[in-house]
Image (cartoon, rainbow, N blue to C red):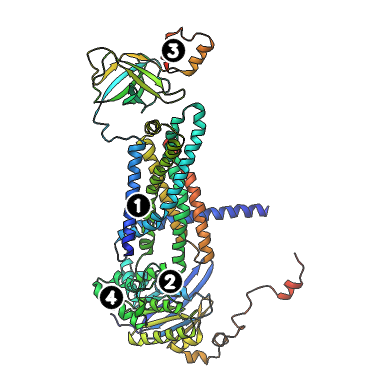
Amino acid sequence: MNHHSDNFIEIRGVSFRRGERVIFDNIDMTIPRGKVTGIMGPSGTGKTTLLRLIGAQLRPDAGQILVDGQALSSMGRKGLFRMRSKMGMLFQSGALFTDLTVFENVAFPLRVHTHLSENMIRDIVLMKLQAVGLRGATDLMPSELSGGMARRVALARAIALDPDFIMYDEPFVGQDPIAMGVLVNLIRKLNSALNLTSVIVSHDLAETASIADHLYLIADGHVIASGSPEELQNSDDPRIRQFMNGEPDGPVPFHYPAEDVREQLLGDKR
Amino acid sequence: MRMRTVEISVGAFLLAGLFALVLLALRVSGLSLNTEASTYRLYAEFDNVGSLTKRAKVAMGGVTIGRVVDVELDKKTYMARVVMDIDTNIDNIPVDSSAAIITAGLLGEKFIGISIGGAAEFLQDEETIDDTQSAIVLEDLIGKFLLGSVGSDDDSSGGDSF
Amino acid sequence: MNRIIDQIALLGRSGLDMIQAIGRATIMLVQAIFGRNTGHGSFSTLLAQQIYAVGVLSLIIITVSGVFIGMVLGLQGYNILVRYGTEQSVGQLVALSLVRELGPVVTALLFAGRAGSALTAEIGLMKATEQLSSMEMIGVDPLKRIIAPRFWAGVISMPLLACIFSMVGIFGGSMVGVDWLGIYEGSFWGNMEQAVDFRNDVIDGLIKSVVFGFVVTWIAIFQGYDAVPTSEGISRATTRTVVYASLAVLGLDFILTAVMFGDL
């Protein structure tokens, strides 16, 4: 592994658009090695898109993304394949393969990327499931799991290959407080135990702030703030304050752009 | 265990599909696998073959003994030449046998019926049946019937199927 | 005036959309067929699972429909032909209509409704629940692991189902014609044998069913793969699969019939 950089991921001047809609406009971001980085922002600002760009599932319209010092755009199919074996991703919905058991789901990346014997795979899968507390659930189908359990299985699958880097897409959405607490703990513990680099994309402020070393705030296709959770909390920038304090109206307007309400209500009906 | 049932039923399904195809081939379309090798060729020339087509059967005493392979016009004699493939098992058709174009029922398929002659010599491969009776063309027959001339003309001698 | 121009623009846009969709569908199919990486597990196991889902599970509806269509053909054919005294041709009528037309076409329509819609919904749901994305992140091409086995399963199952449909239908026809209405069995099957040609009827019917299997499966998996990943998007994609596949089958049937039997 090449340790020439402290940043596991560098995003340089990346722009991305979907049709007419600009999702990212020339953003720069670095994700430090061995830390938990939170990327936050209002819903619909393309946070998941950012993860897809890092995972090379989407290609940026301009700019470069470097993973572990290597530009994604310079990798061929094989390079991407190898790069992805170093990346884990926890999807918003868990994204377990519904036709495979819990065991097979966790074993899936091992079977794809390694040639281990069946016994080895079994041991690794059980260890990973033990780490998320679900060793007893090996034979269940994903449809038999609760939402929180499914996400933990998905986490076990994401760490099955002992990746260097793991991305969490909205890990806290739709979880009850207990499941949420379990997940927050797991993410933090895994990061220090496995020496991971983690990225959490979320709009759950308190949970993300509690485990992240570094936060990015994005809105309208730009990075509007970055810093440690404390720095952001104490910021004077009205845009940051609005998001951090959850105020309904401010620089990010409550109203969707429209003509003046009085004019529309009282004006001539056409 | 679950995988095993899947595999067994898929295997059974593939077999059932192929079996259905084989039935379609043998039972429905009457394909026999060794037709090519065991036939010999006969010709017959008719004034008029009516609507006789390729693949029509050639029968003797009501039993199918071969098939019509081709129907073509002889440019010299202006006669219709019918090419037939006859089963090699039936190798004893006398040379003076006659061929007639017969209609199954009033509107049914046309086929060639062979009536046995009395000669001691038998027809060989690539030989021609000389004694032929043409197809009855229904329109001609009706025309003649209206003119009251049925039975007074030799052309309608195939009318026994009427 | 403006409204007319708007309408023309709308027409143009939907035309362009359609061409784009066909392009995407072709790219998807080519990548699915020529990609290599299926992850772990042999391709034949994945294929067997899909043939089970697509073929074996369609068997009941195909057989039942086949028997009834054959019986109806036998009955209708008998009632008409008996007036001309040619009721022994019922066998030929039943067999020719089934082998040439009804076998491939009705099987394809049922297949689109039974298996096609299920394929679309399954793939659409996998997309909506990010299973396709997560597979890609793990390093397995979903086109190869999810799409390709389903495609081949459809192409393989369809002709087999059509053969079973035709054969079961012919037996249904003989049940009505021979066992119930009393047509002489020998002439029923004999007439059929004489009228049906292996090369021109059975094989051409088989070619039709392969083409239909290809088209229906292709439409079904593309609609699933291209679906908007919401519950509404999936339900619309499923409807589109059944509508487009049925129209494609009927349209192609005319073209194929014109090519195969037109000059006879």
Of the residues shown, which amino acid type is indicated by label 2?
Answer: Ser
Measured along the vertical axis of the image, is residue C219 above or below residue A186?
above
Q: Amino acid at mark 4?
A: Arg
Q: Secondary structure at mark 3?
A: helix
Of residues B100 and C15, which is closer to you in this image?
B100
Mark 3 to mark 2: distance in Å? Answer: 81 Å
Count the marks: how many? 4
Residue at the far left: name it. B121
Q: Position of residue C252 (x, y in %)?
A: 46, 44
Query: Same chain, marks 3 and 4?
Result: no
On screen, residue B140 versus residue A110, left or right, reads right
- Sort mark 4 into few (<14), some (14-19) or many (20+) by Cα contacts within 10 Å: some
Which dot, 3 or 4, sits closer to the camera? 3
SS label for mark 1: helix
Front residue (pair C176, A93): C176
Of the numbered discs 4 and 2, the one sitting upstream in the chain is 4
Kindly identify which chain the residue marked by label 3 belongs to: B
**Residue name at image x 48 percent, y 26 percent:** C85
- Say what amino acid the circle numbered 3 marks: Ser
Quarter in which the N terminus of chain A is drawn: bottom left
Can you give x and y, in whole percent of width and height, for residue A121 in the image?
27, 74
Residue A190 versus residue C83: which sits nearer the camera?
C83
Q: Residue, x 29% and y 80% (percent of image)?
A: A2
Density class for disc 1 (Cα within 10 Å; few <14, some 14-19, many ≥20) is: many
Residue indicated by mark 4: A122
Q: Nearer the viewer, mark 4 or mark 1?
A: 1
- Does residue A27 lie above or below B29 as drawn? below
Instruction: Indicate the position of residue A225 as horizontal and vertical percent values.
Output: 50, 85
Mark 3 crowdedness (10 Å alpha carbons): few <14, some 14-19, many ≥20: some
Mark 2 and mark 1: Cα distance apart in space: 29 Å
